[in-house]
Amino acid sequence: MRTIKRKALPLNLNKEHCLKKLCRAYAKEKQYWLDKLKGWEFQALLGKPRAIRDAFVDKKYTSLYGLQARHWKLALQDAVETWDKYWQAIFVNVKHKIYAKYVTEVERHYAYWLLKN
């Protein structure tokens, strides 16, 4: 496979301003979703970003920061993935403690199951 490099011209001031505004709005939207996902009602849906998205589409959600629908949906998906990685990192930190505390494989399996669910 061959790589093609294309040179880009510098942005004019108006386009640069619009791009920076879009990036700030996306970051704020992602932070909004991260704060929303902290609630217990969304913990069970962490692996299913489409279920969360569909629920908000049914409620006719519009972005508080003026993003188009495709952009807030991407911010939501990004936030769900970030939150899921956060919980996976916590699980890695707790896993060795479970292994040390519980001796039998059944107890460990039950503890892992509780954490997963």
Image (cartoon, rainbow, N blue to C red):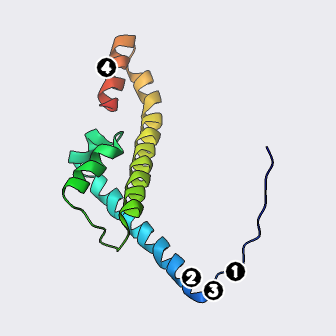
The Cα–Cα distance between marks 3 and 2, rounded to whole angstroms, is: 6 Å
Location of residue 10 by image quarter = bottom right
The Cα–Cα distance between marks 3 and 4, rounded to whole angstroms, is: 59 Å
Q: Sequence-wise, which precedes: disc 3 or disc 4?
A: 3
Say what secondary structure mark 3 lies in.
loop
The Cα–Cα distance between marks 2 and 4, rounded to whole angstroms, is: 55 Å
Find out whether the residues at labels 2 and 1 contact each other: C-beta distance under 8 Å.
no
Find out whether the residues at labels 3 and 2 contact each other: C-beta distance under 8 Å.
yes
Q: Which mark is residue 10?
A: 1
Q: Sequence-wise, which precedes: disc 2 or disc 4?
A: 2
Q: Sequence-wise, which precedes: disc 2 or disc 1?
A: 1
- Under mark 3, the amino acid is Asn
**x then y, percent, for residue 70:** 40, 60
Find out whether the residues at labels 3 and 4 contact each other: C-beta distance under 8 Å.
no
**x then y, percent, for residue 53:** 30, 51
Q: Is residue 41 left or right of residue 70?
A: left
Q: Which residue is mark 2?
A: 15
